Amino acid sequence: MRVAQVHRPTTRAHVETHLRRHAYQALGDRSLYSVRPSDVQAWTAGLTAALAPRTVGTVHGIVSGIFRTAGRDRLIVSNPCEGTRLPKVSKAQVEPLPLDVVQALELALPGRYRALVRLAAGTGLRQGECLGLTTDRVDFLRRVVTVDRQLVTVVGREPFLAPPKTSASVRAVQARLGHASAAETLDTYSHLWPDSDDRTRAAVDAVLFADSVRTEEVGI
């Protein structure tokens, strides 16, 4: 069960890991046309006993994509992954780290890395996006950060810069979190943030920078 698919390096590594850990042992030695929906359902049931529902859905989606590609190439008549009963994924509400935890993370890092903690806490950027940010992407006068690349690490290669996972677009939270659609952002994160750039910045600054401002005022 091996069909070539084109992926970015990080995605390719992610897909390979999931297939190696969760799919090859059960399905890897089978010919594509020999796998039936009942086989996929039994395999998925085994995954459900060991993995979180979201991970089961991810692995199933990867395998389904392989069969879908095989179908387009006329190697199989239908995708045996269609109609699989998957475990229900419950959407947990995202909660930001408490201020004292953010401050503890800062203090636990060497000085040169502490800005990364505030950057991540204040913008919601992913780790790779934080590490890929350079000063030429920061407009200090307008207080705007351009997120158009991330630092990518792949086994066997030197770290390199590449485009971010998704392109950002219309709302303050959406732009900060790199979501492709406003609906995704609103469903997941909007309960945490004000609805405009200036109010968002003011809220973040009031929390993350209040202590440092007070410290400077008293001359510590």
Image (cartoon, rainbow, N blue to C red):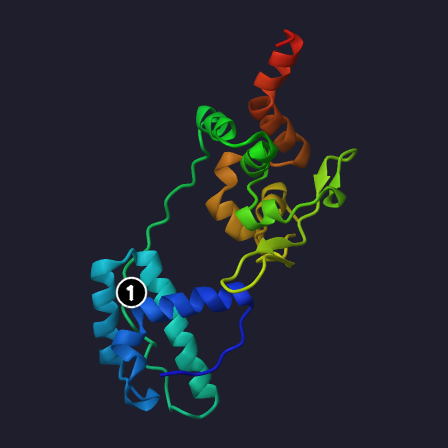
Which residue is nearer to you in this view: 10 or 83? 10
Which residue is nearer to you in this view: 49 or 137? 137
Residue 9 falls left or right of residue 69: right
Can residue 194 be seen in the rendering of this structure?
A: no
Total label count? 1
Which residue is nearer to you in this view: 164 or 206? 164
- Across and down, in percent, residue 34 comes to 28, 89
Can residue 42 be seen in the rendering of this structure?
A: yes
Query: Residue visible at 40% across and 41% down?
Result: 93
Quadrant of res 173: top right
- Across and down, in percent, residue 23 comes to 31, 72
Query: Residue visible at 27% across and 68% down?
Result: 85
Which residue is nearer to you in this view: 88 or 220? 220
**Mark 1, residue position:** 86
Up/down of 111 relative to 220, above or below: below
Callout 1, which amino acid? Leu
Quadrant in which the C terminus is drawn: top right
Up/down of 173 relative to 67, above or below: above
- Across and down, in percent, residue 37 comes to 27, 80
Quadrant of res 27: bottom left
Q: Residue furthest right?
A: 141
Q: Residue furthest top?
A: 218
The secondary element bearing badge 1 is classed as: loop
- Across and down, in percent, residue 84 comes to 29, 72
Q: Residues within 10 Å of mark 1 (few under 14, many from 20)?
A: some
Quadrant in which the N terminus is drawn: bottom left
Up/down of 49 relative to 129, above or below: below
Query: Residue visible at 50% across and 78% down?
Result: 5
Up/down of 49 relative to 16, above or below: above
